[in-house]
Image (cartoon, grey):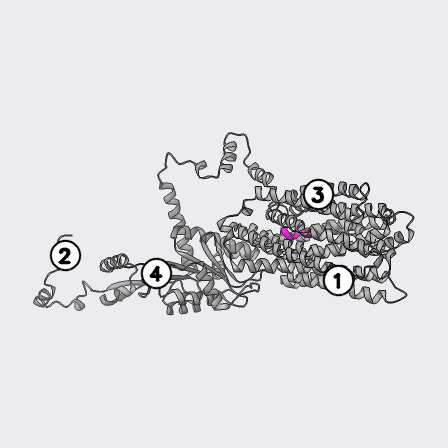
Amino acid sequence: MKGYEPCHNTEEVIAAYGYDSEADTENPTGSVFCSHGAGFYVGWDQVEDYMHTESREKAVEKEKQRNSYELPPVIDEEELKAIFERTYGPVKRERNVFSKRVQAPETVIRRSKKQVNEKEYLLVDGYNIIFAWEDLKELSEINIEAARMKLMDILSNYQGYKKQTLILVFDAYKVPGNVGEVQKYHNIHVVYTKEAETADQYIEKTVQEIGKKYHVTVATSDALEQMIILGQGAQRISAKGLLEEILTVNQEIRNEHLNRPQSASHYLFESLPEEMAELMDEVRLGRLEFDEIGKRHEEKTGAIDLTTGNEMRAIVVFALPLIAGNLFQQLYNLMDTMIVGKFIGADALAAVGSSYMTMNFLTSIIIGLCMGSGIVFSWFYGSRQREKLEQSMFQSFLFILAVTVMITSASLVFLDQLLYLLNIESSIFQMTRAYLFIIICGMGFVFLYNYFTAVLRSMGNSFTPLIFLVISSVINIVLDYIFVVPFQMGVSGAAYATVIAQAVSAAGIAVYTLWKIKEVSISKRMLKGERELFCMIVNQSLLTSVQQSIMNFGILMVQGLVNSFGVIVMAGFAAAVKIDSFAYMPVQDFGNAFSTYVAQNRGAGKMERIEKGKNSALKLIVGSCVAISTLVVLFAGPLMRLFIDASETQVIFEGVRYLRIVSPFYCLIGFLFLLYGLYRGIGKPQFSIVLTIISLGTRVLLAYVLSAIPAVGIVGIWWAIPIGWFLADAVGFLYYHFMKK
């Protein structure tokens, strides 16, 4: 650069020649900048305020500064969450859609001199971009969720190349069960604001807090937002400008890939997990079709992906093992009843029947907790958040274990008081107490089996729990007969048979799950506690448990009323309820399967698929319930004689009367189970509680009112049941209809 170095006596030379730089129009000292297709002159002393590149002197000085001190810490995800909470507070409401904003001129604003840190941030107004880009706008008219996901994928790819911190902000959108939150989607942060709050407010707050320390750019074409951003020292890029930038980056990525030198030592299989590498090698050698890889994985883990494929098929395939498993469970419950009724007598049957209701109430608390936790597992599994999945499983296990210990202890201490509350007659009091004491001692096995069942089902594996339940059922049936008939252990023998069978199934499924499912194995990542996650687990689990408990508590209250009508009615009701539960059990399990289906698809953001699944499920419930109701009405008498000796005509009469009043309305309880599953899956277990209160509250109230009328009597209790179902269904479907709007 010789000949272009600075003059050592500049001022003397200028004075000697009388040179005036400002008057020299041929060689102006300033510069011309372009804006909106037109040029404008900028004086030499103002050029740095407008230029996009730094002067050599500034670059040297900046390098010195970089070497002389440590940069401020980079804002992380926790700070983003803190900004969100300081702006809006904890958010627990659904998201909502806001209108399209006013488009502003396509300009790029110069960088503020205040920003001194190299760290760059890009804040993107999600809906503004969606409605500004034609392809996303067209997609949003069909499925707004799909448009959001596509934008997130585009920005994730863009961030991977640019390496700046990218924050995508969406106005609250009305998705059932969704709440305002900050999420990590691959390598970008996604913020969902509170209902009735805009993305602008969050962006303004964030820019205000970090704009003075970092280089912040906001992607929006909102005119008002631009003015605010400028006032806080940030840059703005329009929606069109961002699209052009992304297209440019994509081309650069392509060029870099095409020009990248190939390494002779780098192979595809080296970067794959061992298992996947083996499968791919089989494909390469022609021993395996590529489409079979997914099937191989499903076969190994027993999992079913409920977020893809035909909706009806996915639900049915997942539900069938649940139905089969419950059939076996009901089978060994029936065996208890049949063996006790046939070989011990009506008094023993009444004792076991009363115990069955109490046992269901206590275990429903634990089962409800496991079911609620399973919904949380399904959300994280559907959204592919493995770390959250592992942490939620560990925290849930500890929480439900603690609750199980408390329930077991309290039940054993206050067992006598509970039996007095149920109006158990003195003639069967000791038998009932003996049976219940043993059953309660085995509550820990109920917890283990149902917890690990929830884990497996959340991942789409409903078959493995069936295997262990079948084993348990066979053991229970065999031991029932051995303990009651040859050993003559009475009702205690039936109880011991049940507990031993539960222990075997619990141990088996626990060992299998810990062996097969990596997410359940103890790791440092799993042990990391997050209060927010724990609160989510507790909330979902407790609400589901409350719903299950209320349902069984209502039945327990009805049982207490039935007991007041004497042993004959008690025995008839005990046998009829067994048949009743067995008959509508398939639709109950279908509702539980639908809950997992909804939860996985909610986690994956596929709300439209949930709606399609609901419509298919309704058709299946109607068809199956009509067939089952017809069979029960026609064969009520023979079904009762399976449990009761033919000589007990009064007991059989009461059971048949119950079945012929209740069974024609199985469709109603099928709809109710479907609604329970739907609201649990979308994160609204509290509304399942509302439906349960309506159903059971109506049943209990009408049962006590109608049975007190001499002309109605016991029949009033039976008619109260379908009336409660109908009212709950009506409220559930109406709420869902208005919620979608």
Q: Pointer 1: what residue?
A: 417
Mark 3 vs mark 4: in front: 3
Q: Amino acid at mark 3?
A: Ser
- Label 3 to label 4, Cα distance in Å? 61 Å
Q: Amino acid at mark 4?
A: Pro
Instruction: Answer left or right for 4 relative to 512.
Output: left
Coordinates of residue 427 in the picture (x, y in percent): 85, 56
Q: Residue at x 87, y 59 (%)?
A: 566
Per the picture, the main secondary structure of the magenta-coloured stretch is: helix
**Local secondary structure at mark 1:** helix
- Label 4 to label 2, Cα distance in Å? 37 Å
Mark 3 vs mark 2: in front: 3
Q: The C terminus lies in which quarter of the figure?
A: bottom right
Would residue 554 be visible to someone looking at this image?
no
Name the one closer to the observer, 615 or 420.
420
As drawn, 535 above or below 498: below
Callout 2 touching callout 1 (CB < 8 Å): no
Badge 1, how many Cα within 10 Å: few under 14, some, many 20+? few
Q: Pointer 2: what residue?
A: 5
Q: Which residues are magenta?
A: 591-597
Q: Pointer 3: what residue?
A: 472
Q: Amino acid at mark 1?
A: Gln
Q: Amino acid at mark 2?
A: Glu
Q: Residue at x 42, y 57 (%)?
A: 166
Coordinates of residue 274 in the picture (x, y in percent): 49, 37
Badge 4, how many Cα within 10 Å: few under 14, some, many 20+? few
First-in-chain label (3 vs 1): 1
